[in-house]
């Protein structure tokens, strides 16, 4: 019984009892090549938002050569240390595309073409966690409540019979 109570506490903190946090998603894409071998996904530190990059696919682009193209991701681990991990080794003849599923990383993230000349297209989602406890959502909720007109019970006429 205490186990399920703990899950309820976890969910109420993460999502808030009144929908306090919200996740917005936007399409993300970048192209890596010998001319532009890396891309850094970062957020404005002054913002009170959390930005995440959810990588979905890594795909060779038009004009890729007969060579290995290794794509590496650099991000922070749970201890706050920056680590680099190869996520794809693409070759035009045997593996032109890799699906990473839902590979989610917190900003800042650097995606680098470690070897090869590309072009390599990386795509996914840019996720932004927003706190709805601020005035934006509160005012929307208040406006919505003002627009709802309470339904009054129908008045019965004494003289009318069915």
Image (cartoon, rainbow, N blue to C red):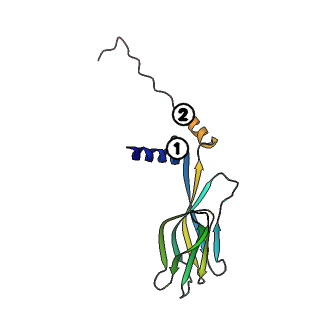
Q: Are marks 1 and 2 in contact (CB under 8 Å)?
A: no
Q: Report the residue at 59% width, 63% height from top.
A: 79
Query: Mark 1: few, some, or many residues within 10 Å (few <14, many ≥20)?
Result: some
The image quarter containing residue 20 is: top right
Extreme residue in the top direction: 159
Q: Residue furthest bottom?
A: 66
Q: Residue furthest left?
A: 162
| Residue 83: percent from left, percent from top | 59, 71
**Mark 1 falls on what kind of element?**
loop
Q: Position of residue 114 (x, y in %)?
A: 60, 80
Earlier in the chain: of badge 1 and badge 2, it is 1
Q: Picture quarter containing residue 45?
A: bottom right
Q: Nearer the viewer, residue 11 or 71?
A: 11
Query: Residue 25: horizontal and vertical position, in percent?
Result: 55, 57
Closest to the observer: 86 or 161?
86
User: Residue, x 60% and y 74% (percent of image)?
Assistant: 31
Q: Which mark is residue 145?
A: 2
- Which disc is residue 6 wearing? none
Q: What is the secondary structure assignment of the residue under circle 2?
A: helix
Q: Position of residue 154 (x, y in %)?
A: 41, 21
Marker disc for residue 16: 1
Q: Quadrant of the N terminus?
A: top left
Quadrant in which residue 147 is drawn: top right
């Amino acid at each position: 019984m205490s186990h399920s109570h703990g899950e309820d506490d976890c969910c109420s903190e993460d999502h808030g009892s009144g929908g306090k946090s919200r996740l917005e998603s936007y399409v993300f894409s970048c192209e890596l090549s010998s001319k532009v071998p890396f891309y850094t996904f970062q957020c404005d530190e002054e913002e009170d938002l959390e930005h995440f990059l959810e990588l979905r696919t890594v795909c060779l682009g038009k004009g890729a050569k007969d060579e290995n193209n290794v794509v590496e991701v650099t991000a922070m681990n749970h201890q706050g240390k920056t680590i680099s991990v190869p996520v794809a080794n693409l070759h035009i003849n045997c593996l032109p595309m890799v699906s990473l599923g839902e590979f989610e990383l917190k900003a800042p993230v650097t995606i680098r073409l470690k070897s090869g000349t590309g072009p390599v297209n990386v795509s996914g989602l840019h996720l932004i966690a927003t706190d709805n406890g601020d005035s934006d959502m509160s005012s929307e909720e208040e406006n919505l409540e003002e627009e709802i007109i309470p339904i009054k019970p129908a008045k019965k006429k004494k003289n009318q019979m069915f």
